[in-house]
Image (cartoon, rainbow, N blue to C red):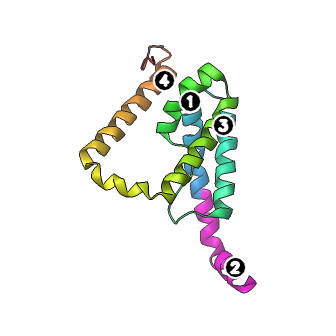
Amino acid sequence: MIEKIKAAWLSNVRADILAGLVVALALIPEAIAFSIIAGIDPKVGLYASFCICTVIAFVGGRPAMISAATGAMALLMVNLVKDHGLQYLLAASLLCGVMQIAAGYLRLGELMRFVSRSVVTGFVNALAILIFMAQLPELTGVTWPVYVSP
């Protein structure tokens, strides 16, 4: 048993270290940008990304998968952080994780085949536009409303 674990974990140390460096370099600007979008301190985003990567390194993952925050979640968490503070962000993130695990056990991912490619493309493009508009004040220094929540 221990020999199998050694073989799996230590079979290609050089490639694993290089992959870890590449992921870290890709993750740092992403974590900072999504933290700014969500309205929290970038240090909090960096710490959270480090914790996510550490947990995923031990409990699983797939080749070429970067486990980190997403732009969609950052945009959704803006109002939560603004209205209730940073402490609710952890509870909301844990609840999202529980819901994703439940959806996985119920095999709800198979329902995605009924969503057309144009709907997914529209969602991703709208998300890109919202992220761009949320970053515009950081770039230009001019504040203007990106979207108004009810």
- State the extent of the magenta-drawn residues as a range: 1-21
**Residue drawn at 48 percent across, 20 percent down:** 137
Which residue does the numbered mark 2 point to in the structure image?
A: 5
Residue 11 within the magenta-colored segment of the rendering: yes
Residue 9, percent from left and from top: 67, 75
**Residue drawn at 52 percent across, 66 percent down:** 63
SS under mark 2? helix
Residue 115, percent from left and from top: 29, 48
**Lower sequence index among marks 4 and 2:** 2
Which residue does the numbered mark 4 point to in the structure image?
A: 139
**Lower sequence index among marks 1 and 4:** 1
Which residue does the numbered mark 3 point to in the structure image?
A: 91
* Front disc: 1 or 4: 1
Which residue does the numbered mark 1 point to in the structure image?
A: 38
Between 93 and 2, which is closer to the camera in this rendering?
93
Real-space Cα distance between discs 1 and 3? 15 Å
* Front disc: 1 or 3: 3
**Residue drawn at 41 percent across, 55 percent down:** 109
